[in-house]
Amino acid sequence: MYKRLRTIFQYIFFLGLGIFLVWWSIKDLTAGDKSQIRTALKTGKYFLIIPVFFILFLSHYVRALRWRLLISSLGYNPSRINTFFAVMIGYLANQAIPRLGEVLKCTVLARYEKVPVDKLIGTIILERLIDALTLLLIFAITLAIQPDFYSQLIDAFFHSPKSGEIKKTPGYIILLIATGVIGFCIGLWMIFKKKNINDLFVLFNKTGRSIWQGISAIQHLKKRKQFILFTIALWTLYLSGGYIGFMALHETEQYGIKEAFTILSAGSIGMIVTPGGIGAYALLIEKTMQSYGLQKGVALAFGWILWLAQTSVILIGGLISFVALPYFNKRKQSEQG
């Protein structure tokens, strides 16, 4: 009962956070900002959304192929189409309740491909570890090609663009803010979980071992090179979606691959913070683009266009997969029978 109430509380909290961030992003919009949004949306080249849709669908298919590769290393051989359907249904569920999709896609695939759920969950944990490490690499690349990016992003959040002043936050301030946020999150965890400092060290040790196990597990894959290739392809597709997205608006078409790395970094954080990235994704993209000098209204419009494109792909692909999965397998069984 307590666990269920905690889950409900977490969902309400993070959904509420998303709604709050939506409100926060629009509460100070001036008449000029609203005019910028209307102009940007009216003059947008929406035909470029088609290749973005294709790239996003392809990225989900590549993720399904990579997951299938992990499953095959356990001695099972699920069909590509069922694996893809399960991935899309999982994404759809995550739009409502975070992490539900991970369990649901394992349950779906186990039902239609007769793979034990516990083994599938093990592959999901490994996948998440690899994605976390890849995301850290993306952050490092972003920092390497744009050393001032994170300080500029903080400036965009805390310094009013109306003042006309361009300030640079000192590195020690960024470090203090980051330390404060991490310390606050750790404190909340210790309070809600009723943990002490020893439990914290145990958690750090366990996390470190898990990361090392994730890295080591790749070495034991039969098709290690193929797994790495799928991972590179997956994140390259994510990067390409943002890069082509720049071309959809006249005001953003001058941006290139360097800026695409930054919105990939910021957007990835946004998708983690709230269910489906609602509120957080568009806000982080807005602040990121403002740090490049883009007007507030246009930056916000761009953030919502990218978020709507990603969410639409998940909703459409997830619903089609939900309907097609039983039909496809029923037809498959009748053909085999």
Image (cartoon, helix red, strand yellow):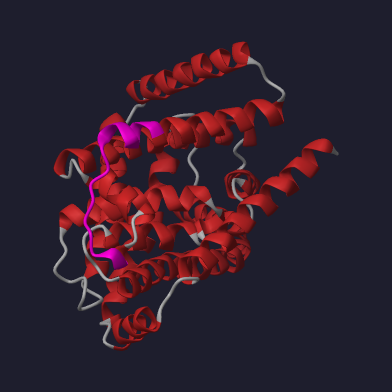
Quadrant location of residue 256? Answer: bottom left
Residue in the foreground of this view, choosing between 256 and 154: 154
Query: 230 left or right of 124?
Result: left
For the image, the number of numbered tags is 0
Against 23, residue 155 (above or below) is: above
Q: Point out residue 333 in the picture as x, y percentages from the top left corner.
A: 61, 58
| 181 relative to 291 in the view: left or right | right
| Residue 40 in view, yes or no | yes
User: Would you identify the image quadrant in which residue 237 lies?
Assistant: bottom left
187 or 278, which lies in front? 187
- 105 versus 174 height, above or below: below
Is residue 167 a member of the stretch shown in magenta?
yes
Residue at 40% from the left image edge and 35% from the top image edge = 178
Q: Is 12 inside the magenta-drawn segment?
A: no
Residue 319 pos. (x, y %) = 57, 68
Q: Which residues are magenta?
A: 162-176
Quadrant that contains the C terminus: bottom right
Q: Is 169 placed left or right of 201 in the picture?
A: left
Image point 27% across, 41% down: which residue?
A: 138
**Which residue is at a point 31% across and 81% down the rendered structure image?**
36
Relative to 193, say whether 267 is above or below.
Answer: below
Quarter holding the N terminus is top right
Location of residue 135 with respect to 57 vertically, above or below: above
Q: Is residue 85 visible?
A: no
Which residue is situated farthest in the top direction here?
Answer: 198
x, y percentage for residue 128? 46, 36
Residue situated in front as seen by the camera: 220 or 14: 14
Q: Residue at x 37, y 19 (%)?
A: 216
The answer to whether residue 102 is left or right of residue 155 is right
